[in-house]
Amino acid sequence: MKIAIVGGTGDQGIGLALRFVKAGLEVIVGSRDVKKAENTVNLIKNMLKDEDILNIYGATNSEAAEQADLLIMTVPLQAQMGTIFSIKDHVGDKILIDATVPLDTCIGGKPVRYVNVWEGSAAERTAEFLKDEKPIVISAFNNISAASLTNIEEDVNCDCLISGDDEEAKAEVVKLAEKIPGVRGVDCGSLENARIVEKITPLLINLNIRNKIKLAGIRITGI
Ligand SMILES: NC(=O)c1ccc[n+]([C@@H]2O[C@H](COP(=O)([O-])OP(=O)(O)OC[C@H]3O[C@@H](n4cnc5c(N)ncnc54)[C@H](OP(=O)(O)O)[C@@H]3O)[C@@H](O)[C@H]2O)c1
């Protein structure tokens, strides 16, 4: 499976790319600027200490979306609409995983606060923007910190809470998430539950700050 990480040059995109390349999946790092995407690929190869890794390359967001089977969008809320606009011709029928968390930072505020969006969650906003193109929008990877993803010597101690309205797609995303050592994928029901899941992230950021750590995560027990 070929995965495009749209807006993949930031911390979250790099972390996911590292883990999926390590798991043997083919990854395209997308950016508005192909040079930035290529530089990020070189950085990832250096982090994996192997220049000969062939299953990763850089492209524009649009090219990445066109070439991939499955897309993961890792951009801040203020970039969401522009990024979607740049990929919309290539999303139809594909799974589009939205990892966006609407943090108050996007309007100059604090990362420990969630900012409400009209549609209820960032993932539902993505689905609304793309209602004509009809990709299968799934919310996932919102709570797993980039710090834990890039800490490649260690397993990730966090569940991946997955929300969406397509059962088969969610099952595929569970399998994808579980390619990351330590991660358990948890089907959290319909896409509107992204409203709850996205709000957990500012809480985890708060816990990181309060405890002077970087690796706070969440586990669901009893299932
Ligand atoms: N970082 C974490 O630990 C973490 C954890 C869970 C969830 N998340 C969520 O995942 C998403 C990505 O997080 P991140 O920390 O990787 O974000 P980031 O570094 O701020 O941004 C990621 C990429 O988005 C593009 N971008 C940034 N601002 C833009 C703008 N105004 N217009 C268009 N493109 C823009 C840039 O790519 P190009 O310049 O290459 O186009 C940038 O490298 C966010 O919604 C965040 O809340 C992050």
Image (spheres, rainbow, N blue to C red):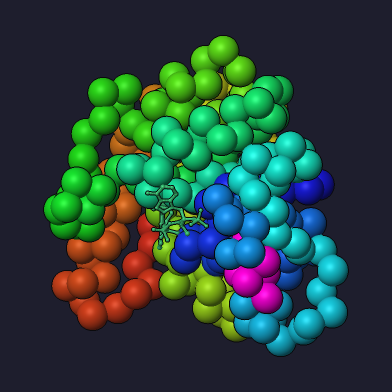
Q: Nearer the viewer, residue 139 or 60?
A: 60
Number of numbered discs overlaid on the protein picture: 0
Q: Which quadrant does ligand 1 occupy? A: bottom left
* Residue 127 in the image, given as x and y percentages of width and height: 48, 23
The correct choice, above or below, for 15 with respect to 76 in the image is below
* Residue 209 seen from this side: yes
- Residue sticking out furthest to the bottom: 49
Question: Considering only vertical position in the picture, is 193 above or below 103?
Answer: above
Q: Position of residue 121 (x, y in %)?
A: 34, 31
Q: Tell me the magenta residue range.
A: 37-42
Q: Is residue 115 above or below residue 59?
A: above
Q: Can you tell which quarter of the image residue 36 is in?
A: bottom right
* 202 part of magenta stretch: no
Instruction: Tell me if 182 is positioned left or right of 147 in this view.
Output: right
Question: Whole-percent x and y of residue 131?
Answer: 52, 15
Which of the 4 image quarters holds residue 118?
top left
The residue sitting at 67% across, 66% down in the picture is: 38
Residue 140, can we see it?
no
Q: Nearer the viewer, residue 198 or 106?
A: 106
Q: Residue at x 46, y 22 (%)?
A: 129
* Secondary structure character of the magenta stretch overall: helix
Q: Nearer the viewer, residue 75 or 31?
A: 31
Q: Position of residue 197 (x, y in %)?
A: 36, 41
Q: Residue at x 26, y 30 (%)?
A: 117
Left of 202 or right of it: where is 147?
right
**Frontmost residue, 47 versus 197:** 47
